[in-house]
């Protein structure tokens, strides 16, 4: 099948490469000429495991352009993978989706054959019917279900493993506005070995929101248990191991620490919470997840203050700035709030991150960025570990020897107890 993909971020590009690996012809569209040129020269612009090798193997099955009209006209199905950022009030900004809808409508106006529009971007239930379909109908002069079809196909891709997640999904959710489009989209996934869940569009959108909300809740819950364990001198990771054997709980997403970050969890929980409130339902658990997660970040500062009273003028080293390991992404990273608080307390901050320092420096140009962890901790009075980079697992006591004080606090479980003796965790 000839597929066009609007938006070449980690979702759009991994979706495109994944479909090309399944022998489809894919054309990615992006406004960023640099991204387009990189894709056409077979080079990946984002860090995703296996993506560069996959791009080499698919060759010209995947091409890219800035010309949306041609891409849509020359394909039979268009996946919309543009950003849906949060607005100040927590609602979703749908301007990129609306622009894409208008452009798609204009592009299919003269087409005779049936065109399918698949929304992969995360958007609140009802927005597609209320906003996007009318825009496509207006700019195409066609009726949804007649001249074109619309589906929702949410993504469940985690940064760092997005290509694997796309190729081996736990399930494929297809929310259809018309059966014909749902059938064609299901046929596109025929070579994937995962259960297909066919629903209406609103249900598919809610499945996406509910999935991220449950995952955010699970992390928040293990952090709550971890905070209690800390007071009892219990290691929450031992507790997590014990509960994880219960198939009803499962052993993933039980890593207690400084809480979740990233471009999705807070955004999606906020959007769902706001939608609920607008309908007169007070979603208190959702509010709690957001509040507790924000507070969880500050627990590492509280612990630091207990160990190092009078933070003003003290030198604190921060290891890890990305919202999680294996990415340079700092969106909603706990490190942002924690470094902000250290600066507010008058600390001198040095930082090291294998990939995210360049992005972090755009927000915090005034702190020292070290080229390795040893340089970051030199003469430091304390060290906070905020991202679970695997290279931190090989840190030894010797690596911390240049510190003034050996106060080491983990916000993520990563140090090896056999290599480093005196350190403490935010929940352990
Ligand atoms: C998430 C969802 O996993 C994915 O399905 C969805 O499509 C997009 O959002 P992502 O944001 O890339 O993916 O990262 P994820 O691996 O889910 O971690 C999110 C945050 O939770 C990170 O800050 C991570 O450090 C934190 N986390 C995760 C924990 O604190 N504990 C855990 O046990 C797991």
Image (spheres, grey):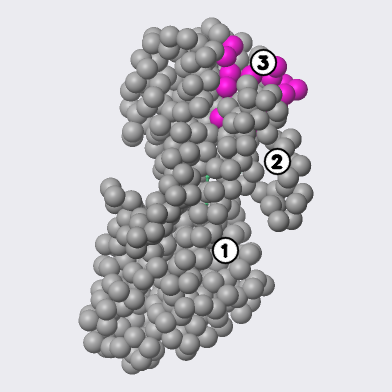
Q: Which residue is mark 3?
A: 422
Give coordinates of residue 240: x percent, y percent.
Answer: 70, 40
The rendered magenta stretch, by its main secondary structure, is classed as loop
- Residue 345 belongs to the span the image colors magenta: no
Query: Measured along the vertical axis of the image, is residue 278 above or below residue 234?
Result: below
Tell me, for residue 283, which label it has, or none. Answer: none
Please check the rendered image and state whether residue 421 is part of the magenta-colored stretch, yes or no: yes
Q: Residue at x 33, y 33 (%)?
A: 363
Q: Quadrant of the C terminus?
A: top right
- Residue visible at 38% across and 88% down in the picture: 145
**Picture residue at 60% right of the left edge, 15% below the top:** 400
Q: Is residue 369 left or right of residue 324?
A: left
Whichever of labels 3 and 1 marks the residue nearer the N terminus, that label is 1
- Report the magenta residues as a range: 406-423
Disc number placed over residue 166 in the picture, else none: 1
Q: Is residue 130 above or below residue 395?
A: below
User: Which element type, helix, strand or loop, lies under badge 1?
Assistant: helix
Q: Which residue is mark 2?
A: 240
Q: Is residue 36 visible?
A: no
On the image, the x and y values in percent for residue 12 come to 45, 63
Q: Earlier in the sequence, mark 3 or mark 2?
A: 2
Q: Nearer the viewer, mark 3 or mark 2?
A: 2
Q: Is mark 1 within 8 Å of ligand 1?
A: no
Dot 1 alpha-carbon crowd within 10 angstroms: few under 14, some 14 to 19, many 20 or more: many
Residue 291 locus on image (x, y percent): 43, 40
Q: Residue at x 46, y 28 (%)?
A: 298
């Amino acid at each position: 099948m000839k597929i066009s993909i609007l938006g070449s971020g980690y979702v759009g590009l991994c979706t495109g490469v994944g479909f090309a690996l399944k022998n489809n012809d894919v054309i990615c569209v992006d406004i960023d000429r640099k991204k387009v040129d990189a894709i056409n020269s077979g080079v990946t612009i984002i860090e995703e495991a296996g993506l560069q090798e996959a791009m080499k193997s698919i060759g010209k099955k995947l091409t890219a352009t800035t010309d949306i009209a041609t891409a849509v006209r020359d394909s039979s199905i268009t996946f919309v993978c543009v950003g849906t950022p949060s607005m100040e009030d927590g609602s979703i900004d749908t301007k990129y989706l609306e622009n894409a809808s208008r452009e798609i409508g204009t592009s299919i106006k003269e087409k005779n054959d049936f065109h399918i529009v698949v929304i992969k971007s995360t958007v609140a239930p009802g927005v597609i019917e209320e906003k996007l379909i009318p825009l496509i109908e207006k700019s195409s002069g066609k009726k949804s279900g007649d001249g074109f079809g619309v589906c929702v196909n949410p993504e469940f891709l985690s940064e760092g493993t997005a290509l694997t997640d796309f190729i081996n999904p736990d399930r494929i959710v297809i929310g259809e506005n018309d059966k014909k489009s749902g059938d064609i989209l299901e046929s596109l996934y025929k070579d994937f070995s995962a259960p297909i869940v066919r629903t209406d569009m609103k249900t598919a959108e809610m499945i996406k929101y509910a999935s991220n909300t449950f995952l955010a809740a699970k992390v928040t819950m293990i952090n709550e248990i971890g905070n209690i364990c800390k007071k009892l001198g219990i290691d929450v990771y031992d507790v997590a191991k014990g509960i994880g054997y219960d198939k009803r709980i499962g052993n993933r997403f039980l890593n207690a620490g400084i809480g979740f970050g990233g471009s999705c969890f807070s955004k999606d929980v906020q959007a769902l919470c706001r939608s609920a409130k607008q309908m007169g339902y007070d979603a208190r658990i959702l509010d709690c997840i957001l509040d507790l997660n924000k507070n969880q970040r500050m627990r590492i500062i509280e612990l630091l203050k207990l160990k190092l009273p009078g933070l003003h003028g003290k030198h604190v080293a921060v290891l890890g700035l990305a919202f999680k390991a294996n990415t340079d992404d700092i969106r909603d990273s706990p490190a942002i709030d924690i470094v902000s608080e250290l600066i507010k307390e008058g600390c001198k901050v040095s930082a090291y991150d294998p990939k995210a320092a360049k992005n972090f420096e755009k927000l915090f140009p005034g702190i020292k960025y070290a080229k390795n962890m040893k340089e970051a901790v030199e003469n430091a009075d304390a060290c906070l570990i905020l991202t679970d980079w695997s290279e931190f697992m090989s840190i030894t006591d010797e690596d911390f020897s240049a510190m003034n004080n050996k106060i080491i606090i983990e916000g993520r479980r990563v140090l090896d107890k056999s290599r480093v003796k005196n350190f403490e965790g935010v929940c352990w």
